[in-house]
Image (cartoon, rainbow, N blue to C red):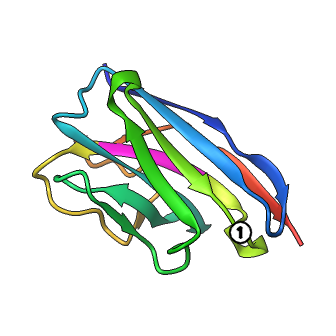
Amino acid sequence: EVQLVQSGGGSAPAGGSLMLTCTASGLSFADFKLSWFRQISGNGCELVSGLTDKDTTVSGDSVKGRFTISQDNAKNTVYLQMNSLKSEDTSVYYCAAKPKNTGGWPPKTTCKNSVSYYHWGQGTQVTVSS
C-alpha cells in the first residue's frame, strides 16, 4: 500500500521560510515521481512544484525563485523548501505521487483527486502572517 506522510509547515511571518517533508512508503522513486500542490478555492488545487520523469523540476509561476523541491532517494522523502513567503502562500499543501510515464503534472486539479494512479498525503496547513 502506498502511503505519503507529510510533516513540517505551520506558521511563519511574511519574508520567512518553512520546509515541508513528504515521506513515501510502498513505492520506489525509480518508478514514481512526486510533487506538491496547494489548495486554491473550494476543492481545487494548483501545482506548486513537481519532479518530472527525468528528475528535473517544474514550478508554478507564483513560486518560481522562492520555492524549491528536492528529493532524497535513500530516505524516500521529498522536500519543499519555501523561502520569501508571502501572505498569499497561505494554504493547505498536499504531497502527491504518480507513476512515471503517465504524463506531466497538471497545473490545476481537484485536491486529492480520485484518479486511480494518484496518491496523496494528508495535507499540511501553511499560514503566512503579513
**Can I make out residue 101 in this image?**
yes
Vertical side of 117 occupied by 17: above or below: below
Would you say 81 lies left or right of 77 here? right
Residue found at the far left of this picture: 101
Vertical side of 30 occupied by 17: above or below: below
On the image, numbered disc 1 is attached to which residue? 84
Q: Residue 95: within the magenta?
A: yes
Q: Residue 126: within the magenta?
A: no
Q: Position of residue 101 (x, y in %)?
A: 10, 51
Element at label 1 = loop
Q: Position of residue 69 (x, y in %)?
A: 45, 53
Image quadrant containing the C terminus: bottom right
Vertical side of 84 occupied by 18: above or below: above
Nearer the observer, 84 or 34: 84
Nearer the observer, 4 or 116: 4
**Can I make out residue 118 in this image?**
no
Q: Position of residue 38 (x, y in %)?
A: 55, 60
Indicate the amino acid at tag 1: Ser
Would you say 11 lies left or right of 48 here? right
Q: Position of residue 1 (x, y in %)?
A: 31, 19
Q: Which residues are magenta?
A: 93-97
**Magenta stretch: dominant SS?**
strand
Nearer the observer, 57 or 46: 57
Number of labels in the image equals: 1
**Which residue is at 67% across, 62% downward?**
83
**Which residue is at 22% across, 39% downward?**
32
Pointer 1 local density, CA inside 10 Å: few below 14, some 14–19, many at least 20: some
**Which residue is at 72% across, 53% downward?**
126
Residue found at the far bottom of this picture: 61
**Which residue is at 29% across, 62% downward?**
105
